[in-house]
Image (cartoon, grey):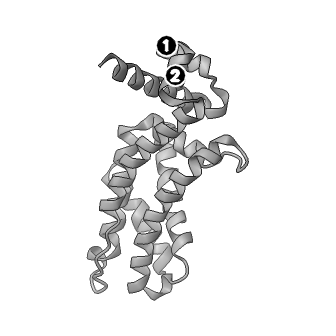
């Protein structure tokens, strides 16, 4: 039990530090000191700082992607606007908003990772998880484009733009501007849909 507690403490402290300072600015010594452990203990559990970072990403993206798997299921109903694309996009935004509120340190870190230099260690470790996350959304857009031909060939850019708009609202919320609620989710979805269907 104590071993499990030490491992969890390391993960928690490392996430706090990575979220505040960025992965590359945090040393293994700093993590060990914050977690109240020795550096060899950190290496015992995770092998390296990179191994620790990878575990944080794997664990948190697994939770987020599990939500996305459920939300991204599209059932066409092209005759009824509010029963077609709208509900799937609302489910996605509400799920991402909820995850960001429940896991603010991880989500803030993930937003920052999206702007890390491609040659950085942060990008090298995180890209496979970010790509898998984007691919779930792209799959929903591919299903939508099968029913809405105007989106054919634009699935990747559509998914990326939708995620960017959603993340922008989350970024504002982190700065103390606005709420992550149903009204905000509706404004994200309605604005996005106006753009793709106008």
Q: Position of residue 194 (x, y in %)?
A: 45, 74
Which secondary structure lies at badge 1? loop
Q: Quadrant of residue 25?
A: top right
Q: Establish if 148 lies above or below 85.
A: below
Residue situated in front as seen by the camera: 197 or 35: 35
Mark seen at residue 37: 1
Disc 1 crowd, CA 10 A, few/some/many (<14, 14-19, 20+)? some
Camera sees residue 177: no
Name which of mark 1 and mark 2 comes first in the sequence: 1
Residue at image coords 37%, 45% = 99
Left of 16 or right of it: where is 23?
right
Please name the residue that numbered disc 2 is placed on. 42
Q: Position of residue 67 (x, y in %)?
A: 33, 54
Circles 1 and 2 in contact, beta carbons < 8 Å: yes
Disc 2 crowd, CA 10 A, few/some/many (<14, 14-19, 20+)? many
Separation (CA) of disc 1 from disc 2: 7 Å
Residue situated in front as seen by the camera: 112 or 190: 112
Q: Position of residue 104 (x, y in %)?
A: 43, 37
Left of 72 or right of it: where is 156?
right
Residue at image coords 71%, 47% = 117
């Amino acid at each position: 039990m104590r071993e499990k507690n030490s491992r969890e403490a390391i993960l928690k402290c490392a996430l706090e530090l990575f979220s505040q300072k960025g992965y590359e600015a945090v040393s293994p010594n700093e993590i060990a000191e914050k977690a109240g452990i020795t550096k060899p203990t950190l290496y015992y559990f995770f092998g390296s700082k990179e191994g620790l970072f990878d575990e944080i990403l794997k664990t948190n993206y697994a939770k987020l992607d599990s939500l996305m798997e459920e939300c991204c299921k599209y059932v066409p109903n092209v005759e009824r606007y509010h029963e077609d694309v709208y509900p799937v996009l609302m489910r996605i935004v509400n799920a991402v908003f909820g995850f960001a509120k429940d896991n603010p340190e991880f989500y803030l870190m993930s937003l920052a990772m999206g702007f890390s230099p491609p040659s950085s260690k942060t990008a090298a470790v995180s890209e496979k998880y970010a790509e898998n996350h984007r691919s779930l959304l792209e799959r929903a857009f591919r299903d939508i484009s099968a029913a809405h031909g105007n989106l054919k060939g634009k699935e990747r850019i559509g998914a990326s733009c939708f995620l960017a708009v959603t993340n922008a609202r989350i970024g504002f919320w982190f700065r103390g501007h606005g709420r992550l609620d149903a009204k905000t989710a509706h404004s994200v979805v309605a604005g996005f849909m106006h753009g793709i269907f106008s």
